[in-house]
Image: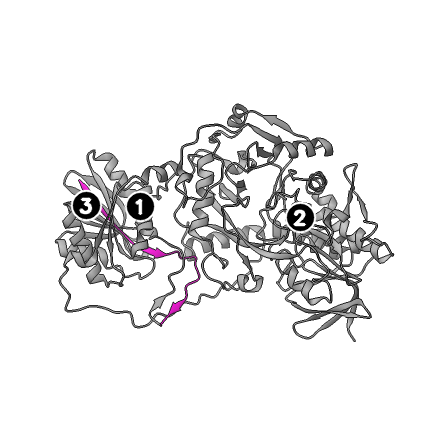
Amino acid sequence: MNKKYDAIIIGAGVIGSPIAYELSRMGYKTLNVDKLHDAGEGSTAGSCAIVRAHYSTADGVAMAYEGFKYWLDWENYLDNVTDEKGLARYMNTGSFLIKSQGHDWKKVKKNYDEVGVRYEELDNDKIKEMVPPADLHEFWPVRRPEDPKFFDEPANEVEGAIFCPEGGYVNDPALSAHNIMRAAEAKGAEFLFNAEVVDIRSEDGKVAGITLKDGTQIDAGIVVNVGGPHSFKINKMAKGVWEGCNIKTKALRHEVMYCPSPDGYDYLNDGYHMSDGDIGCYVRPEVGNTFLIGSEDPDCDPQEWVDPDDFYAGKGGHGKDNVLTEEQWKAQCYRLGKRIPTLQVPNQPKGIVDLYDCSDDWIPVYDKSDLPGFYMAIGTSGNQYKNAPVVGRMMAELIDACEKGLDHDNEPFQYKFKHIDRSTDVGFFSRKREINYNSSFSVNG
Amino acid sequence: MQIYVCVKHVPDSAVNITIVDKNSIDENITFLLNPYDEHAITEAVQIKKNLPGSEVIAVCLGKTDARNTLRSALAMGADRGILIVSENGCDSIETAKALKAAMEQDGSPGLIFTGRESIDAEGMQTMFRIGALFNFPVATNVVKLDIEADRAVVNSELSGGTANTYDMSLPCVIGAGRGLNTPDYPTFRDVVNSKKKPIKTIVFSELNIEASLTGANIIELEPLQQKREPKEITGDKAVIAKEIVKILRDKAKVI
């Protein structure tokens, strides 16, 4: 006889684990299945784990700001569970958003005011005081080093920055998912690893369970797709789900670089998270006193949509596999080298290549599906790590409400944040939505 | 003094290497300046700073795209580059002859650097063959170098952690080892400035190198499959810390 659970969650990353945690706290008997060997070892491990508030929509800002409160109070969120691997640490460096043509910072500021995010506006002198090696010339538009204009001398300066004293990064994203797994287990949740889902079974027009690669069948009336870059493959396994989504997801290859901080600048201890649309980069400190350099997906950069299984197997060749490329290494490091002129760029690329589970408008899909009992938390597009604990609670409440009869498609669930005085319309994240052109269509969300 | 640095365009050690036709690799991967050659360039540039009027010239034998590696050498401080273009692979005999011919055609070497080895072929022959062709003294895996008037005092690391000190006349050939210096990588400004530096291109055949009676061809390449074997270190924290230090020192040899 098949084992049976109330809910099966496909994926044990930083979104799948908190969904299990919150459902377990609500009394659901849950099982997470993951094809890897431990929690958070997939694309979660490759996340830059940035925690910052700026988003292009007020709902986006609100959710991120709500998320801060979880990271700042991590032990309590985990109900003081013990994890033999130790606890992940939130590093509250403070966060810069450079005012430039690369960001609609006026919209962000308006969103901050609406949500009540604490911030201050800094002029360039103040930025220089806080970030001594910075050159605040304007380098816009973002170009690639293959373009001769990339090397043009700048004339103007950027217009200052918006600085949030709250913001930073989590030092070990995989560990943070592991912490949540341990917290979920303490509430009765179970996790199954090295288990690849090959089928989503349904009966009488409702989800019935999953089948694993080794033939094992596990039953549940609720199945949640939190498969990260594999999300579109999982949706296609469930009858009618892919077809019922107006917003689709696919896997986007992404490179993140580690470049040593210049001599004399203790970036690890004195540095800030910085979103710098003027050079198309975001940065944060990393161990070894290095800059972790992410890309804000400028239009001039190539986008490689890949098959996640081939990618993780190292297939596809140059620029399509899981190996950094010299071209992108130079693009991201030289862009930062304009802002930090003393940055020395080694010849050999160092960093991480991983995948975004990217939706059509770079806004996630947190929703039910056209198959009753099948839910999804997908399309997290490289910017939802910070929201994971919020999403865990929101998805659990959404699932609970739908299972109790809510017609979410027609009367969207309103999620009341736990820490800030605000609600959000979960219909914003609907699979049925039209593409949201207010989105930045980038990792900025 | 004209200081020549022989550099090689090699595959990035982090890429997935695919062998094609048994004896070559799929070259649609990232190629870089050979890491040992970074130490050679850094040292040459440092010597130039102490010897006003000197010039650092990077020389590379390779396919057309090896120009990128010369650009890296120029960004690290070399004054100009010479690219000897050969679309066919050369063995170590031809390589040394071509590098010598290009250097002789260009000027008069007062000091020649190579890396200790290239990370692709690991032949470790180029510095000796160049030295033999010029009749210059050679030291390899050099970890300390002092230029004193017309002499070079070098410290050359041997296997097992021992080292010899040599006093050599100039010109001489130096195979740079990892311990020689910390590579001085370029800033963005260095990259911008290096774009104006010239690279002279010579076609291999134009060097009129006499064909060798002997030579070496690659018959078959075999991929090295390295297996990771994780081992958990258990015990109290002091024991774990001691074990980690032991591994870093004795196995990884990084401390």
Q: Which region shows up in magenta? A: B1-21
Measured from the top left, where is residue A165 in percent x and y?
63, 32
Q: Chain of mark 1?
A: B
Amino acid of disc 1: Ala
Q: Which mark is residue B73?
A: 1
Depth check, mark 2 against mark 3: the one in front is: 2
Q: Which mark is residue B111?
A: 3
Confirm whether circles 1 and 2 share one chain. Answer: no
Amino acid of disc 2: Ile
Q: Is residue B62 above or below residue A135?
A: below
The residue under label 2 is A363
| Nearer to me, A88 or B158 | A88
Confirm whether circles 2 and 3 share one chain. Answer: no
Q: Quadrant of residue B130?
A: bottom left
Q: Is residue B29 left or right of residue A301?
A: left
Identified at 50% across, 53% down, the residue is: B244
| Residue contact between numbered discs 2 and 3, judged by CB atoms under 8 Å | no
Amino acid of disc 3: Leu
Can residue B52 be seen? yes
